[in-house]
Amino acid sequence: MAGSRHDTAAPRPTSRDVARAAGVSQATVSLVLGDKWQGRVAERTAERVRAAARDLGYRPNLAARNLRLGRTRTALLVVPALTNEFFARVHTGAARVAARHGFGVVLYPAPDVTAPARDPFDSARASLDGVLASSMASEALATIRGDELPLVMLDSDPAHSLGAATVNLDIAQGMRLAAEHLLALGHRDFLHLAADINSWTFDVRRDALRSVLHGTGATVAPARSALAVDAARTATEAALTASGTRPTAVICDDDVLAAGACKAARRLGLHVPDDLSVTGFDDLTLATAVEPELTTVSLPAERFGEQGMDTLIAVLDGRTLEPQPLPVRLVVRGSTAQGPAPRR
């Protein structure tokens, strides 16, 4: 009878059951499900073990394994903002890789990318296996990291990183592509709408832009703005109405800034792109929500998060990875067009 006290739940599958179903030894099951199989077990065999575990509904006793290994199987991802779509995508990629390795990811915002971030736990060292930090100054992680917690920096200066490894996007190439696109369209008077944040990633954009424009006869007027549409609109309006030659192209550090620049153009009676070309950076959903749609640099944010977590796992396993900067690409849309006739 249903609910009878004589009814017993089906026994939980064991590693021995998985081994029997996959036709391998329990030691092989332990290697595969403990993610220690690379170089010791054939990939086809590892997949057979994982499939058997899924089919049986087998779940390893993580608490016992973690106690034995001295690990929490938890990584912290520190980002400047939870509302920014780029960091949401980074988290998606990092969490995908973490899940394959039996790790959880705790997402933690630290809006001030240079000041020390507060430790979200009583002791991060006791609660975490490692830290991923995206677009942060490494010194900001000192409180969370302690002296021994493995740290992998994303979108950070590799020459001055306190992390065990650094993973980057090819940010400089992205800015070069945007600038070269505008130069090819005939633009020579630029406004660089820069993020008002003292950060390596934005310094790289500024330096790459200067490098591309050097020797071309082009001029670039600098303007800085907080990463908000209204702030960008105000900064762009001020720059476009200042005395001197009006820029014909605005090159922005971020899509949010580019949206503000487009808004400023409309308020000043300028048409994008006929009177003013605008480029963004990131290729957020916003880039295709505005009209005209933004020409922007597309960053593979999810792949970035994946590579960051792969690198942290490697550090935890005592392996060394030296990832190359991930490639970016320019997506040309309706916010850029041919510039004015060449100056004489």
Image (spheres, helix red, strand yellow):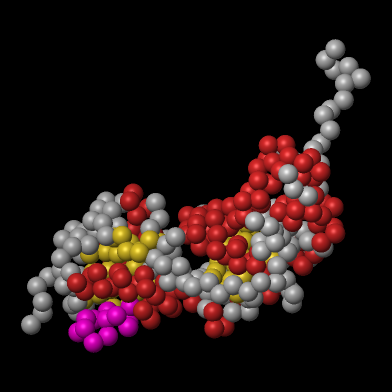
Question: Which residue is more in the foreground, 222 or 128?
Answer: 128
**Magenta stretch encompasses residue 211:** yes
Question: Can residue 104 be seen?
Answer: no
Q: Is residue 344 left or right of residue 288?
A: left
Who's the residue at 49% across and 77% down the image? 200
Which residue is at the far right? 6
| Part of the protein shown in magenta | 209-220
Residue 71: percent from the left, percent from the top?
A: 78, 61
- Left or right: residue 314 versus residue 201 is right
Task: Note whether 270 is above or below 181 in the view shown.
Answer: above
**In this image, 170 relative to 48: left or right?**
left
Q: In the figure, residue 269 lies in which quadrant? A: bottom left
| Magenta segment includes 169 | no
Q: Quadrant of the N terminus?
A: top right
> Which is nearer the eye, 198 or 141?
141
Picture quarter containing residue 11?
top right
**Does the rendering let one see residue 48?**
yes
Which residue lies most toward the front here?
23
Residue shown at 60%/67% (left/top)?
A: 311
Residue 214 locus on image (x, y percent): 27, 85
Residue visible at 33% across and 51% down? 288
Which residue appears farthest toward the bottom when viewing the image? 215
**Residue drawn 68% across and 37% down?**
55
